[in-house]
Image (cartoon, rainbow, N blue to C red):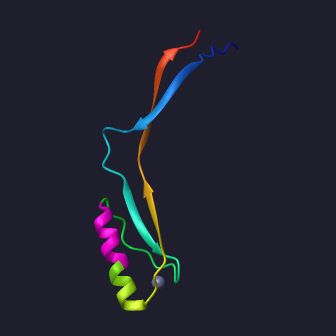
Amino acid sequence: MTKVLRHLLWKIKPDPQRQAPIRYVQCRGCEEKSPVEASQAEGDLWAMNHAGRTGHRCYREFAASDLIATPIRDSR
Ligand SMILES: [Zn+2]
């Protein structure tokens, strides 16, 4: 059995076929989470509403982007 192995250099970049990063906000006091949105403003609004309703003041924002690996050249 023969295997041919190729060594390539790769770069990682945002996938142009995908949407903007998705994000949500989580309360650090009770761990309630906002809906997943593409807009930071929606997460901020959720946190302000949550603060007004509960008095909780500390939040953590999570954001995720889709990435794509692209070979840039053969290193052989
Ligand atoms: Zn809370």
Q: Position of residue 6 (x, y in %)?
A: 59, 16
Q: Is residue 67 above or below residue 61?
A: above
Q: Position of residue 46 (x, y in %)?
A: 34, 76
Q: Residue 49 magenta-drawn?
A: no
Q: Is residue 57 above or below residue 17?
A: below
**Nearer to us in this view, 7 or 30:** 30
Q: Looking at this rendering, what residue extends furthest in the top direction?
A: 76
Q: Position of residue 70 (x, y in %)?
A: 45, 27
Q: Looking at this rendering, what residue extends furthest in the right direction?
A: 1
Residue found at x 43% / y 41%? 67
Q: Position of residue 23 (x, y in %)?
A: 39, 61
Q: Is residue 14 above or below residue 21?
A: above
Q: Is residue 18 above or below residue 53?
A: above
**Nearer to us in this view, 68 or 61:** 61
How many numbered marks appear?
0
Please provide the residue range marked out in magenta: 39-47
Instruction: Write down the quadrant of residue 33 in the picture.
Output: bottom left
Q: Considering the image in quadrants, where does the N terminus appear? A: top right
Q: Main secondary structure of the magenta part?
A: helix
Q: Considering the image in quadrants, where does the C terminus appear? A: top right
Residue found at x 46% / y 62%? 62
* Apparent side of residue 4 relative to residue 74 in the rendered image (left or right): right
* Apparent side of residue 68 relative to residue 75 in the rendered image (left or right): left
Residue found at x 53% / y 82%? 29
Instruction: Write down the quadrant of residue 39 in the picture.
Output: bottom left
